[in-house]
Amino acid sequence: MFFVTIFTASLSIRAQGTLRAGPMVGHVDMRSATIWLQTNAEANVRITYRDNVVGKGLATATRRTRAEDGNCLSFVLDSVEPGRTYEYHVIVDDALVPEPVPNTFRSRPIWKWRGTDLPPYTIAVGSCHYVNQPGYERQDSAGNESGYGSEYEIFSSIVEAKPDAMVWLGDNTYLREPDWNSRSGMIKRYSHTRAHEASRTLFATVPNYATWDDHDYGPNDADRGFWGKDHALNVFKLFWANPSYGVMDKPGVTTSFEMIDMQFFMLDDRYYRSPNGRKDGDHTILGEHQIQWLIDALSSSTATFKVIVVGSQFLTDNLRKECFSRFPEERERIINLITENKIPGVLFVTGDIHAAELSKLDRSDAYPLYELTSSSLTAGSNKDIAKQPNTYRVPGTEYGAHNFGLLSVAGPKGQRVLTMRIMDKDGKEVWKREVSEAELK
């Protein structure tokens, strides 16, 4: 890291064509932040940045994008200080990349042992993002294509909600038949989706975290037997900027991050998942190591709210083949382990079903478990959700149109309240429910 004596104003400005996609703010903590980007061709790139307090210009080292990696790079900005707003700029081959909107992020504040109330915050969540591409869509018998994605203005609505982070719940792009059989095909699909203009401001100004589900992993309902799963993992890591990938020395997209007094546990429901048609052997979605890590991590967490994020629905008793209800032993085991270890504050956030709903499992021996499902962002909607069974659905929370979710936390220490909302594509509230800290103990 070095100081820049003359900041970005002294640089020449080149056409936007130097970047294919990005920049995207990834994991942000108190003393570091990660910025992802993709250039159109191999190029020398660096990031300059400065905060709103000291204003001293800083820059990363210059690195070169490589065609074999899709010309993607993630930069760690390691001279960040807590609780400050930063502006950042992308420099490609010594030229400043124009910014349709100011590129900014805010580092996490120090909040423990400060003698003040905990700050409020909001996390946006969503799943199932489909970007149409002529020539790669399904056709009818006459050869006419019908795009599966629509209403991309939803991303402007997410930005207008001013979330402190965005959590992508899986199916964040849709691999098609020409894509999933090669690493290069996967890179092309991810590149096409990431370059879509509608999501640019969200990526450039809000920290983004992601897990995956079947469609950004491989074919529909793909499992551990998918031969291209290592390519899929490599490409996922190229295009996202999570804090880590995999746990207990096992590959995957499992990770965790904190937001004030909420901790997210991002699970991988694909890499170790048993085939739906397998009759013998183990029958699992997460795999033993991931279950052990999850319970360890939950037991160690001091967060008020502990959010388990997974692509497949967890609580529902609907026997869709992609839900945990098809893996009842694993589902019950996880619930029992949470209960036996007396872990407070646990709830689930999921995607996948192209509709939104809130599920609640009342338990005689412990607090109720909630699951917020938010889907889809732009992919086709499940308008029949109200007709589909789910014993645990909270009445009035089913919604079969494009949506995103908001998790907002506020209140004094010891009396925190989580407000869960589902918002429509225009940012209007569809419904909201509040859950107090005390209710989850």
Image (cartoon, rainbow, N blue to C red):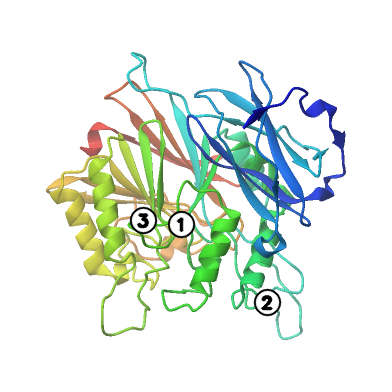
Helix or strand or loop: what does disc 1 sit on? loop
Q: CA distance from mark 2 to mark 1?
A: 23 Å
Q: Residue at x 24, y 49 (%)?
A: 296
The crowding category of the residue bearing disc 1, from other C-alpha atoms within 10 Å (few below 14, some 14 to 19, many at least 20), is: many
Q: Give the residue type at disc 1.
A: Gly
Q: Which residue is mark 3?
A: 247
Helix or strand or loop: what does disc 3 sit on? loop
The crowding category of the residue bearing disc 3, from other C-alpha atoms within 10 Å (few below 14, some 14 to 19, many at least 20), is: some
Q: Position of residue 70 (x, y in %)?
A: 68, 61
Q: Quadrant location of the N terminus?
A: top right
Horizontal placement of 313 versus 186: left or right? left
Q: Residue at x 84, y 27 (%)?
A: 10
Q: Position of residue 189 (x, y in %)?
A: 66, 66
Q: CA distance from mark 1 to mark 3?
A: 22 Å
Q: Which residue is mark 1?
A: 351
Q: Which residue is mark 2?
A: 138
Viewer-proximal residue, 317 or 233?
Answer: 233
Total numbered labels placed on residues in the image: 3
Q: CA distance from mark 2 to mark 3?
A: 37 Å
CB of mark 1 within 8 Å of CB of mark 3? Answer: no
CB of mark 2 within 8 Å of CB of mark 1? Answer: no
